[in-house]
Image (tube, rainbow, N blue to C red):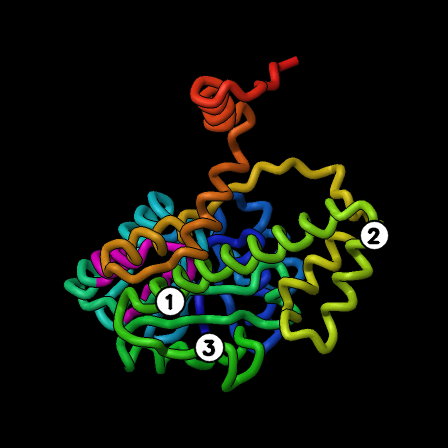
Amino acid sequence: MEIAMIGLGKMGGNMSRRLIKGGHTVIGYNLYPEATDALAEEVGLVPAYSLEELVSKFTSEKRACWIMVPAGKPTEMTVEALKDLLDPGDIIIDGGNSNFNETKARAKDVNKHGIAFIDVGTSGGVWGLTNGYSMMVGGSDDAVKYITPALETLAPGKDKGWGHVGPNGSGHYVKMVHNGIEYGMMQAYAEGFDLMRHKEEFELDMHQISQIWRFGSVIQSWLLDLTANALSDDQDLTDLDGFVPDSGEGRWTVIDSIEQAVPTPVITLALQMRFASRDSEQYWAKMLSAMRGQFGGHAVKKAD
């Protein structure tokens, strides 16, 4: 099929490569034209240097435009611009990590103009080009059916790794929960390896253990494969800082769990631990030390 890709960064660029390799025609636009030119030369992307030009280059009667730009204002601005350029029957696809509530509102607004809206929660990162992308799709049956050839090419297999999960907002909602689970899994691995690293009497090799667990273990996973890669050169991770950001989806998962009164203690604590990683001063720890000294007369360690 013919499809446009707006945003040709790590995800959008590799998705374009996979689509073109699969026989699709991809019209591409990026805020920085260097990325557009590079993909045009490398894989035959049809280049466009504005959204107006991108829309005009379609030869098919129905135009499907896939957005892969940062969530929030960039996505909102892109949707608003496309809304004025497309015709009734055309399709806008948001493949980024947008908040599902914002997605529902955008879809409702776009639908008023006769334009279909599809939200695709997309997972796979930099490995998606080779392994395929896991995609959780929200939208109308007709719109999703139209872009199914592209989804089948982007996925790990024609009938696996993707699915139409429900109406608008559901794709981004399922991806939000997916990322919340990811937080919990990452935290569990991190705590386990930290515990073993502190057991100095055994002189454990973290990389060796990660390799053992990769095969035949009940905790084997792709995430553990990536952990083994990270530990292969330096198991002390001396070149890394302990500051761990969050994309926002973990927060949204926790907020939704509170609103629905559904307990998610592991995901919630994993998010809180990311917050803790960013506090270089650790005022809270100093406060704990001060209180112990006040009520119990315990010895207090002074700062250097």
Q: Residue 254: x percent and y percent?
A: 35, 53
Secondary structure category for the residue under label 3: strand
Q: Is residue 207 magenta?
A: no
Callout 1 amino acid: Val
Q: Residue 116: x percent and y percent?
A: 26, 69
Quadrant of res 132: bottom right
* Residue pointed to by mark 3: 162
Callout 3 amino acid: Trp
- Residue at the extreme bottom: 159
- Residue at the extreme front: 296
Callout 2 amino acid: Phe
Secondary structure category for the residue under label 2: helix
Q: Earlier in the sequence, mark 1 or mark 2?
A: 1
Q: Which mark is residue 138?
A: none
User: Bounds of the magenta span?
Assistant: 90-107
Residue name at image x 62 percent, y 38 percent: 242
Q: Earlier in the sequence, mark 1 or mark 3?
A: 3
* Residue pointed to by mark 2: 202
Q: Is residue 97 magenta?
A: yes
